[in-house]
Amino acid sequence: MFAKLVDRRRTHLFAHIDWYLFIAALAISILGLVTMRSFSVENAFFERQIVWIGLAVIVFFVASIPDYGFLRRTPVVVTMYILTLVLLALIYIFGSVTLGSQNRFNLGIFFVQPSDPAKIVLALVLAKYFARRHIEIKHIRHILVSGAYAFAIFALVFFQPDLGSAIIIFSIWLGTVLVAGISWKHLVTLFVLAIVISVGAWNYGLRDYQKARVLTFLHPLADVRGTGYNAYQSTVAVGSGELLGKGIGYGTQSKLQFLPEYQTDFIFAAYAEEWGFFGVLILLGLFGVLIIRILVIALHGADNFDALFSAAIGIYLLAQFIVHVGMNMGLLPITGTTLPFMSYGGSHLLTEYLALGILMGLRRHARPTIQARDETELVGAV
């Protein structure tokens, strides 16, 4: 009976799906959908987001089916990396300008933002690079080489300019290097190098409006009607939610259009205003489940590549969550970063569900001991 049950479980198409992870991601998307529903009478964002969520779910399940052994091949990873650089470079020629940033292609019925899938590609490159070199991580050359791979993507995104995505890309690299086992000496060196790069970026890279955002972060009330308007309205929205919130559809900051870009850059502030502190706790709990399940997949990876790639995806989603929430609460400068699985838009949503789908595909090849334990638990439940 045990053998039949195991065979049935292995032949089931979606037996490897981590349903806790999927349900948490879908619940976050639904919370974002409900929050959008309360803003516009015409419900344009709401209706479009339903389509994007449906497509994203399909991408998740389709992406969970293949065997991703081919991702371990150097020619495949190099090809994906070069293609990513080419697309990011073409943005400067054919990209459309939105809110001061030239970071997406206008395909007529929808936009494509290459910086979103570039985050998955960077995770693949770093996982591939350190899978066989994690023991040699103490050699500074490996940190510099991996940093060069990340910097090429970082620079192309930073000068679009898209400061938010650039920060996420840097976070993926730094987090992966830390997971791989960087020494404290090299960490201090990187910290000093980051300061030097930041000074250079401030003097030669950042545009005036980006500098204004940073200065607004340091002095948020200096110009509440100008550069500090978005940050001020966002913090007001978050604080006005209080304990239980104003109720779905009754968010004055968002419903009366005081809060700009409520469906994307400030979805957390809009949600917090209507759902309150308890609603925020629910959202944090769902993200907590999501990140924990990703870390479990990383710990149970079939090899170093699986473990490092899973960890990089977890770092990517966690960093984007922290940056978005931080800027909505006035703790970080406004960078125009979406909230994973929750903000409006198809490009980032498809990328995030694709990343989770790939993790499910890798989960099919977990360590035999873990598979045996799961099978034992399944038999016990029956």
Image (cartoon, rainbow, N blue to C red):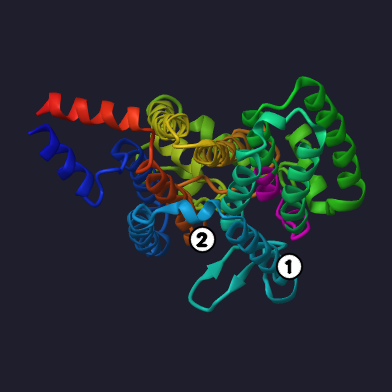
Instruction: From the image, tell me which residue sits under label 1.
Output: 89
Residue 219 x, y percent position in the rendering: 78, 33
Q: Is residue 270 covered in magenta?
A: no
Instruction: From the image, tell me which residue sits under label 2.
Output: 347
Magenta region, mostly helix, strand or loop? helix
Residue 30 x, y percent position in the rendering: 34, 47
Residue 223 x, y percent position in the rendering: 77, 41
Left/right of residue 67 with respect to residue 319 in the rendered view = left
Task: Determine the residue positioned at 27% across, 26% down.
Answer: 373
User: SS at mark 1?
Assistant: helix
Task: Determine the residue positioned at 74% across, 75% down.
Answer: 93
Q: Which range is magenta?
A: 157-169
Amino acid type of the residue tagged 1 in the rendering? Ala
Front-most of residues 46 and 54: 54
Q: CA distance from mark 1 to mark 2?
A: 18 Å
**Picture quarter with the C terminus:** top left
